[in-house]
Amino acid sequence: MYLWGLTIDLVSSVALDLAAGLCVDFAAHIGYAFLSCRGTKTERSIRSVEYIGGAVLHGGVTTLLALCMLGTSSSYIFTAYFKVSKLDRKSIHGQEMIEIFFLNFFSEDF
């Protein structure tokens, strides 16, 4: 946050909390869908992305579109939230990584 010119205050702390929460939320939805499906690990991975991946992707895209509007603002609150919420873009990578984690570390009969 220092490199972005932000101090650790209430606004940036709340924004950081929200960004981290959204990243965990997206991964939790994919993980729950994976654990709810039946079949081999590969089948469960494909089904979980088919089942909930679209909704999670749409949630991430609409959040990103809303954040783009904040980037043009001159208000400190909105610009701080925009800068910190760039971390939310990493949630797409989190979706991919949780699938790889499940494929490598869960047994077939789990």
Image (cartoon, helix red, strand yellow):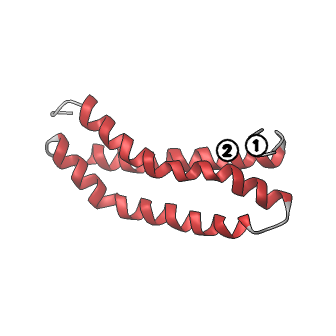
Q: Callout 1: helix, strand or loop?
A: helix
Relative to the observer, which residue lies in front, 36 or 1?
1
Q: Which mark is residue 13?
A: 1
Tell me the amino acid under the disc marked 2.
Answer: Asp
- Residue shown at the point (70%, 53%) measured from the top left: 83
Q: Position of residue 40 (x, y in %)?
A: 14, 42
Q: Which mark is residue 55?
A: none
Task: Kindly report the distance in space between the C-alpha atoms of the residues bearing marks 1 and 2.
Answer: 6 Å
Q: Is residue 109 left or right of residue 13?
A: left
Q: Which mark is residue 17?
A: 2
Q: Position of residue 67 (x, y in %)?
A: 65, 64
- Residue shown at the point (60%, 48%) measured from the top left: 87
As displayed, is residue 56 above or below residue 90? below
Tell me the amino acid under the disc marked 1.
Answer: Ser
State if disc 2 and disc 1 touch (CB < 8 Å).
Answer: yes
As displayed, is residue 36 above or below residue 102? below
